[in-house]
Amino acid sequence: MLLIRNGRVLRGKHWTRANIIISDSGKIVDVFRSVNAKGYLLSKVDTIYNARGYLIFPGIIDMHVHFREPGLEWKEDFESGSKAAIAGGVTIVADMPNNKPPINSLERYLRKIKLAEKKSYCDFLLYIGLPEDPSQLLKFLEEKDNIPMPAGVKVFMYNPKEENTVLNKDLPKDFLYVFHAEDYRYFTEISDCNDYSAFEKSRPKEAEISAIQKIVGILEKRDLRAHVAHLSSYEGLLEIVRAKKKRFKISTEVTPHHLLLTKDHGRKLGGIAKCYPPLRSELDRRMLFRGLLQGYIDAIASDHAPHSLEEKMKDLCDAEPGITGVQLLLPLIFTLAKKAHVKNFRPIIRALSENPARILGLKKRGRIKIGYYGDLVIFNHRKEWKISPEVLLSKSRVTPYEGMKVKGWVLATFLRGRLVYENGEFLERIGICARSVQ
């Protein structure tokens, strides 16, 4: 058995000293304060890891990444993306289906699982795309006893065909439907390709509000589970809050870039800060953070979307949309919380680990608790450092956070009780489909 000693875990609102024993099967056997009280268990320990008083987080579950494989491996693949994840304390990712070809059939889904299992350093789930004929989703249900089920079904509301499908056709209720919530009817041409405010106005928050209202309209008529990706506006948050108060099965996530950056940053960064939906105002940013701390926003997800430097350095009309972020997720959020003088980290830890596990239907993951898998992050909360491209392990090293000073550094990552990363070295590659370890 493994003993992780002399760490600090969050109990209630306070970080308290803790020791964690993990069995050879990778599950947490006990969490306790004093090593003098567990003589019988300690006699069975054969490996000790000294956490040296640093914080221990449950492994981060990033429920929104784009690892680009298959089809765009020159931007990212499962090896580079999962290494960036593990180095950032992310032990499970859920990868999006907009590949080439799109992952919208059972055959393509199963091929992608095999591909990912050969390369991934972290555990993973895969989303599938919405088929034009939603009855194709029944093939997954027919095979559910033989295959790991998808993380969910991704729906792009700005795609007229997909919007029409979800609004007018019957959908199986057995899936989580994950929505990119922008209504294309509110889109306009960018009036100035060098002005971020003009770009933001071309995909205004009204597009997000309208799409969320349509999603809620679906839930009023059908017993479905909906998840709204990358929430960007205060008004969009209000729509989510109203739906939650009506007890609809709806959840949402927010990205680090919508929590830390605004369109004012976009004016300086140009295409490097281009993302869908765009960065919004300082008020939106503040209210999203407040909604997170109040528990109305369920999850924090990176929406890791790598592109080459050449693609991001173009003007706002031609630059590819997306921001890399899986490796920086924990340091960025920890730094934001510290600057905001957050005293209760519980909502943040829930949004990083516990809630994504619940939303994705992952059992025994996302918490530091007896009987749960030992997905753990040893986090040096004292270290201050400056973000630079050289630190990033993604194939895309262009980032709007370059030069930003952050506090907190991932020293080590444990996946299912095994030390897979420490001090910049990858010790084991054991990543598999997370459904396979239920």
Image (cartoon, grey):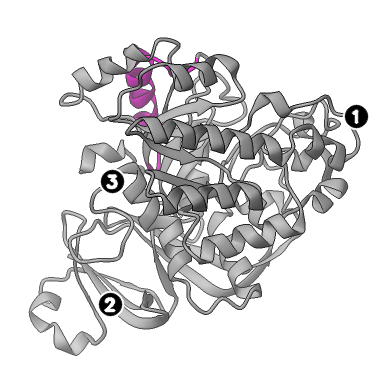
Mark 1 → mark 3, Cα distance in angstroms = 45 Å
> Is residue 413 visible in the rendered structure shown here?
yes
Look at mark 2 in the image and give the residue it sits on: 19
Question: In this image, 154 relative to 182: left or right?
Answer: left
Look at mark 3 in the image and give the residue it sits on: 362
Amino acid type, residue under disc 1 in the picture? Ser
Residue 287: x, y in percent? 64, 60
Mark 2 → mark 1, Cα distance in angstroms = 58 Å
Residue 354: x, y in percent? 36, 57
Q: Is residue 239 magenta?
A: no
Amino acid type, residue under disc 3 in the picture? Leu
Mark 2 → mark 3, Cα distance in angstroms = 25 Å
Q: Residues within 10 Å of mark 2 (few under 14, many from 20)?
A: many
Residue positioned 64% across, 47% down in the render: 232
Which range is magenta?
102-123
The mark found on residue 191 in the picture is: 1
Q: Main secondary structure of the magenta part?
A: helix
Q: Residues within 10 Å of mark 3 (few under 14, many from 20)?
A: some
Outermost residue to the left: 40
Q: As rendered, which of 38 and 364 lies closer to the eye? A: 364
The mark found on residue 22 in the picture is: none
Amino acid type, residue under disc 2 in the picture? Asn
Question: In this image, 337 relative to 437: left or right?
Answer: right
Residue 286: x, y in percent? 67, 62
> Is residue 331 visible in the rendered structure shown here?
no
Query: Of marks 2 and 3, which one's residue comes earlier in the chain?
Result: 2
Residue positioned 47% across, 22% down in the render: 167
